[in-house]
Image (cartoon, coloured by chain):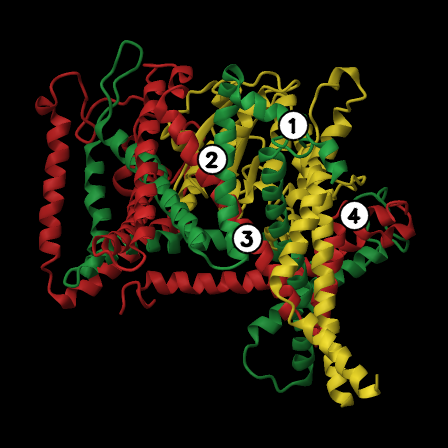
Chain colours: A green, B red, C yellow
Amino acid sequence: MIDLLAQAQPDNVFTRAWWDALVTREESWQILPTAFKFTVAAILTVGLYSLLYRENRFYRFVEHLFIGLATGFSVVGIVWEPVLHQKWWVPMVGAAGTDETAMKLAYWPWAVVLPIGVLAFFVFSKKHGWLSRIPIGIILGLWAGQQFNAFQNRYLPQLADSARPFIPNQFTLSSRLDPSGTLTVPDAINNLIVMATFIVVLSYFLYSFEQQSKLFQRSAIAGRWLLMVGFGAIFGTTMMTRFSLFIDRAYFLLIEWLKLGPIA
Amino acid sequence: MNWLIAQVESPEPGFWGLPHTDAPLLTQGFFWAIVGSLVGMVVVIFFLARVPSNFRRPIAVAFVFLAGMFYVLEWVLPRGKDMSGETVIPFLFGSNYEDAVPVVANLSQIIFGLLLALGILSIFRVHFGRLFRLEKDWFFSFVLLGSMAVMIVFGLMNWSLDQAVAREAITSEQASRTIAAQGFQFVFFDMLQNLDAAMFSLIAFFILSAAYRAFRIKSIEATIMMATALVVLMSFIPIFLAITNWLPADQFVGNFRVDTIGDWILDTINAPALRAIDLGLGLGILAMAIRIMLGLERGVSVD
Amino acid sequence: MTNAEETKAESRFWLTLQALDRRWLYLILVLIVSWLVLQPIEAPNVVSTRSEALYDYLSGLDEGDVVLVESNWTNSTRGESRGQFQALMRLLMRKKIKFVITAIADPQAPNIAREVIESIAKEPGSNNYQENVDWVMAGYFPNGENHVMSMVNDVRKELATKGIEDSPVMEGINDLSDMKAIINVTASATILIWYERIRNKAPIGLMCTAVMSAENIPYFVAGQLEGLVIGAKGGFDFETLLAEEFPDTNPEFSEYTNFESGRRYMSPLAFALMLLVLSVVAGNVAMYMLRRGGERS
């Protein structure tokens, strides 16, 4: 612990100097706003973490605060500013020109779009609820229409990469110096593994009905095992993300707030 | 058709784009055009609401199908090049399909935004009701609605400051010193962003306790999964990479470096395995898209 | 002690271990992470080929080239995304590559990105990057699918809706293919939209959270991604490569900051993951011993 305090920044909150500065009139103006903001953030963070001990009212308070702030932000940040203002209001009403800027025409037909979107709010009405299906249907229809192009762009290169050459033309180990077009034995084996894995896992997925043939049964077992390799990679990388996020919060509390160690 | 999105270049005023001048609002044509369109739409909706129930489904399906067909047209319509070498896909009334795409995209973004507003309204309804009737835990609803209101007020004030800066009415320096900007900074960066980070980091603890209690290595599958996870994790952590760092990468023994083994698993087995799952999902999505467009998917246009 | 008592005591130990209150586990995690955040252990890095591919590509661009940076992260993934984004910004600014920032996943993202960009622009080596001159903020676009489609279709028209088409950054950009790269710094599935709609107009670089990496590696393998930077380790890779290109041993670069959260978070991460592995092992050993005890009696 002594080691730690020796590492701490000279102005960490456990030093006399920090508290002295806080009550000095000139310096407190520099310290106080940041200290206040960080302390509020830290209290909120600890409030959420209190759930780890047990469910409590402070946690619920902070949780509702979070939902409220996030919802409030989406009103301005999603609905008003980028959509209703920029995509609807500005093109619809245009703008009068000034000395420096040209006049922007008012494209009044955009006015028609708002009532169509507002139909969605009929979802709360029992009698006219079906009207809400029109705007939802337009969005879903556009989404569905895009999927054909999306499939082509996203999966065709994937399929092309799954059909790989597997007859080697050089019988040595791979090297970085090999000219392009060389396929060494190890590369050929790797390519075979890629193709076999792809086919076996795909067949495990597609044959959802019961298989009588021994070959298919075996391939399904192999498919399940190879799939587990994929799931293992997903599990490992998921843990990495989750821990990184917690480490970042520990960094915030210990370094940014309490200044107990060197920055970065 | 691109002129409908405005401001790309300044085309001549016409029927669809009316001039906006400094004259009083009530004397301007565009104002009355907007009012007229809104009133017209209200009338249309009034009659739509009175459509007999056996026509409702075909109407809803027609909207879905027409919207879906728009992007399919890109494949169906013939394409050519104009004088300047730009791609042209002739569309309705001699317009270019490529120009219609941004207009439809804009339209869909507006409707999408209004659908999100619907979600926000539902949260508001639930909590407002709870607060109004002083039900159990009304205090938490009060906190939620209060913080929502504070964020909306500061957000709008901050937005109008941004507008003023864009108009060059004030400098960004002046804007940042106002109470509105400072308040927004506080509720957004210091409160919302830190809560966001803390909320997501909580999951680390839950996964750790789940791994301890539930990850039982009883089968070959579980063993393969755990072993892969271990190797992949090691290949991402410099302390473990350092163990085999001394092996020369371009010789045969380089194959036994932790990073080489990790990358081999990820590229040679994980990649095709997940690609196969992904392709399976992609085919499923494609099938669903067709069902949606044809009005066969439940919940979209069929009950 | 008799044999039976011994067996009983032993099984009681394994039972306790198996039924251990999860809060003890949490406490150990908190202590390990706190200790290593305060006293990080440094280990040399082995840069992943996936990160290196993107770094080399960007580093080889010419001064004045324009790239699109789609910033789709907020503080909810600060632990991974910020390190990546900071290192990316340092590289672009040092190489005088211009950039346009957009966001489709989260309306909060532009504010976060701006905060980081403004602080890095003040650093030595960042060529005093100015908004609207060297970089421009296009902001948030709801309905990412349609936005990306419009970007691919006509980048000027789509950015015109934000009034930035005449920015000096956009000079010479008439089509998405005039941009040298699209870099997606993301914490959600936004990249899929680009795979689906890009039509080979520009190379894509992905900087993603580790949790998304496994599903995106197939796209790197198939060449749909120019480079793939994964999680906090990817950020550390970029930092390492920055330090190789701009070493502080060179007096010209002695004031540059190369390392930040990427390197800092590596050792706590290593030990937290070791705790995870140990706890899985402990849980399994306890189960195995109890089952064996059960068979004996």
Q: Which residue corresponds to the image point at 36% horizontal and 19% vertical from the top-left?
A: B165
Residue at disc 4, secondary structure: loop
Residue B130 appears in which quarter of the rendering? bottom left
Q: Locate residue B201, reporting x and y percent.
A: 56, 50
Residue at disc 2, secondary structure: helix
**Dot 4 alpha-carbon crowd within 10 angstroms: few under 14, some 14 to 19, many 20 or more:** few
**Dot 1 alpha-carbon crowd within 10 angstroms: few under 14, some 14 to 19, many 20 or more:** many
The amino acid marked with disc number 4 is: Gly
Chain letter of the residue carrying label 1: C
Chain letter of the residue carrying label 3: B
Q: In this view, does B160 lie to the left or right of C77?
A: left
Compared to residue B155, the image places residue B121 above or below, namely below
Q: Distance between the residues labelled 2 and 4?
A: 56 Å
Q: Residue C91 carries which label?
A: 1
Q: What residue does disc 4 label?
A: A181
Chain letter of the residue carrying label 2: B
Closer to the camera, A216 or B49? B49
Question: Do the residues at discs 2 and 3 belong to one chain?
Answer: yes
Q: What residue does disc 2 label?
A: B190
Q: Which mark is residue B202?
A: 3
Q: Which residue corresponds to the image point at 61% horizontal and 73% vertical from the top-left?
A: A204
The amino acid marked with disc number 3 is: Leu
Chain letter of the residue carrying label 4: A
